[in-house]
Image (cartoon, rainbow, N blue to C red):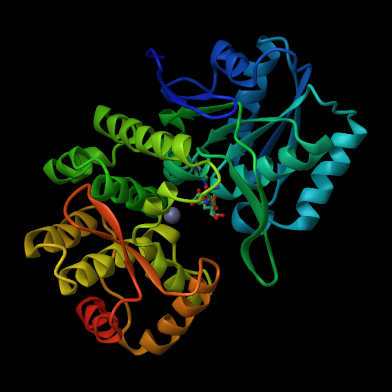
Amino acid sequence: MSEPTRITVRGESSYDVLVGTGLTEDSASLARSVGPGAAKVAVVHPRSLRDIAEKVAAGFTAAGTQPHLMSVPDGEVAKDISVAADLWGQLGRAAFTRTDAVVGVGGGATTDLAGFVAATWLRGVAVVQVPTTLLGMVDAAVGGKTGINTAEGKNLVGAFHPPSGVVCDLDLLQSLPTDELASGMAEVVKVGFIADPRILDLVESDPLDAMDPRGPVLRELVERAVRVKAEVVSEDLADRGRREILNYGHTLGHAIERVEGYTWRHGAAVAVGMVYAAELARLAGRLDDATVERHRHVVRSVGLPTTYSAGHWPDLLEAMQVDKKARGSVLRFVVLDGLAQPGVLEAPDPSWLTAAYERVSA
Ligand SMILES: NC(=O)c1ccc[n+]([C@@H]2O[C@H](COP(=O)([O-])OP(=O)(O)OC[C@H]3O[C@@H](n4cnc5c(N)ncnc54)[C@H](O)[C@@H]3O)[C@@H](O)[C@H]2O)c1
Ligand SMILES: [Zn+2]
């Protein structure tokens, strides 16, 4: 284990995100993240990640906190009220009190569920997130948004419930399939475009290195991406302003996910969405040609798509119209006025919407 990097998210109660290696076995890091007073922790994890959950549990045992392993279904299907209810039942039978805590071990689906159960149990107990995917580390586990899905849509029920700590152990990424790693890399690249272009330099100079969980480059990328997310959510926990920039590429991205019935990975959809947002910004006279092409270059270099099916445009437009209702009365896109200069494009000229889509359709 090397010394972890500590990134503080400020807010009503501040917390640290630790980034490093060997952290899952490190009882001191786990104990510090959960804070004093927890006699027991519920280690919520997908069945497929039992080995990792057992290591985390052993770390808590060594720190003098009693772990209860609680398994949930793998991936997105766990974000369901029936699974939350099962966990509430287990917490009740094990007599979890206000001072006990929940620990989420898994990808973003698991940490969203664990956070939601922690937010609702006894009106809120502490949660420590131990993300096991790149997307979880740089996005889902940081920032305090928790939630579950309903038949009507994704993330419609949830709560803002910041964790008391986040432990990002890069060793855990070694077993992550490459396409899941690439999906998380889309959010890293996103942060590169909206706030920290050094990320883009690192990815471009050696994409294979950048995707190697054993190497120093991925660690630096995770740290940089977490720093930006920490800074943005510190200013805007409740998602009323600055946090919107994190939605870069997500307006079209979410529409692609919906049209594909969520069979596309989130990062792949966001990748196409970023290229689309860049094309829109170019049409609006806000972004130069070279930066638009750089989107394609970086996105491709990490194995993510830059195009989507031409025939789906009417469905995508309709899906974006539905998405807009959640935000206000007009269609809004986060766009760039240059590298690390995010802004908003409201109610774009309909001809731009179509023209930009022609540039990303295959
Ligand atoms: N709360 C937020 O702010 C926020 C932000 C972004 C995304 N999210 C949510 O995150 C979810 C997506 O997260 P995700 O992409 O991590 O998906 P996921 O949690 O479904 O994990 C993807 C797959 O990888 C497997 N896996 C996880 N870790 C592994 C490991 N170390 N080794 C091998 N396999 C592993 C999982 O079992 C799963 O099958 C969505 O539900 C999304 O809504 C939340
Ligand atoms: Zn995203």
Determine whether, in the image, residue 256 is placed left or right of residue 188. Answer: right
Q: Residue at x 67, y 72 (%)?
A: 152
The image quarter in which residue 264 lies: bottom left
Q: Residue at x 22, y 40 (%)?
A: 199
- The image shows residue 29 at horizontal and vertical percentages of 54, 15
- The answer to whether 23 is drawn above or below residue 73 in the figure is above
**Quadrant for the C terminus in the image:** bottom left
Q: Nearer the viewer, residue 270 or 214?
A: 270
Q: Residue at x 72, y 57 (%)?
A: 80
Determine whether, in the image, residue 10 is placed left or right of residue 221. Answer: right
The image quarter in which residue 299 lies: bottom left
- The image shows residue 197 at horizontal and vertical percentages of 19, 42
- The image shows residue 81 at horizontal and vertical percentages of 77, 56
- The image shows residue 70 at horizontal and vertical percentages of 75, 37
**Quadrant for the N terminus in the image:** top left
Ligand 2 picture quarter: bottom left
Q: How many marks?
A: 0
Q: Residue at x 90, y 36 (%)?
A: 92
Determine whether, in the image, residue 295 is placed left or right of residue 101. Answer: left
Determine whether, in the image, residue 127 is placed left or right of residue 247. Answer: right
- The answer to whether 324 is drawn above or below residue 316 in the figure is above
- The answer to whether 74 is drawn above or below residue 217 in the figure is below
The image quarter in which residue 276 lies: bottom left
Q: Nearer the viewer, residue 182 or 275?
A: 275
